[in-house]
Image: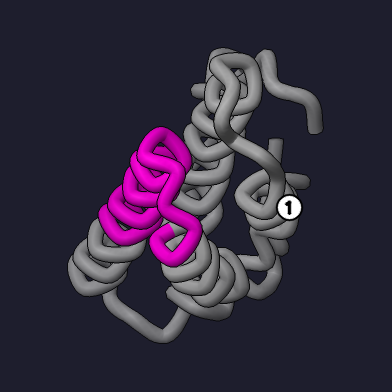
Amino acid sequence: MLSMIDAAVTRTQFAAFPQDIAQRLLSAAEADIVEWGDRLLAAWTAGDQDQIGRARHSLKGLCGNFGAVKLLELSDTDLSGAESRDAYLKMRAATLYAIRVVALGLPANNNWPGSDCPT
């Protein structure tokens, strides 16, 4: 599960902050990843290549902050079909879970979101 991200980079991103500030920063990062992912999927639905490019660009920066290469790779694929969209959403859930676990130093469990997505 932690292979979804670069755990060392993610840990470093939050290590210098008290828990309450780390939580707020984490919530903002999660919201941004969800928002830009939703924009990407909407752009695919609309067939809007400009918006697809903008959403991918934003996701590249967000994913780069955490070494979330697998989510970034999926965002660079054709997401027009239901199967590819489902795979993207599962990977996003797994990535967000991994970021949260590492950033807050939480124990991981076997029933994490997206546990059925390929790693």
Q: Judge by depth and name the residue closer to the eye, 57 or 33.
A: 57
Q: Judge by depth and name the residue closer to the eye, 108 or 57.
A: 57
Residue at the disc numbered 1:
73
Quadrant in the picture for the N terminus:
top right
Q: How many marks?
A: 1
How are the colours assigned in the image?
one colour
- Which three-letter amino acid code belongs to the residue tagged 1? Glu
Residue 41: x and y in percent read 42, 39
Residue 48: x and y in percent read 41, 52
Residue 10 makes an appearance in the image: no
Residue 112 makes an appearance in the image: yes
Give me the residue at 80% from left, 33% from top: 119
Give me the residue at 52% from left, 76% from top: 61
Residue 5: x and y in percent read 68, 55
Find numbered disc 1 in the image and state the secondary structure of the residue it sits on.
Answer: helix
Q: Which residues are magenta?
A: 30-51
Give me the residue at 63% from left, 16% from top: 83
Q: Decide if residue 19 is on the left or right side of residue 3.
A: left
**Residue furthest out toward the bottom:** 16
Q: Is residue 41 magenta?
A: yes
Residue 76, above or below 53? above
Give me the residue at 47% from left, 44% from top: 96
Looking at the rendering, which quadrant does residue 25 occupy? bottom left
Q: Judge by depth and name the residue closer to the eye, 28 or 70.
A: 70
Q: Is residue 113 magenta?
A: no
Looking at the rendering, which quadrant does residue 60 occupy? bottom right
Q: Residues within 10 Å of mark 1 (few under 14, many from 20)?
A: few
Looking at the rendering, which quadrant does residue 31 occupy? bottom left
Residue 102: x and y in percent read 54, 54
Q: Main secondary structure of the magenta part?
A: helix
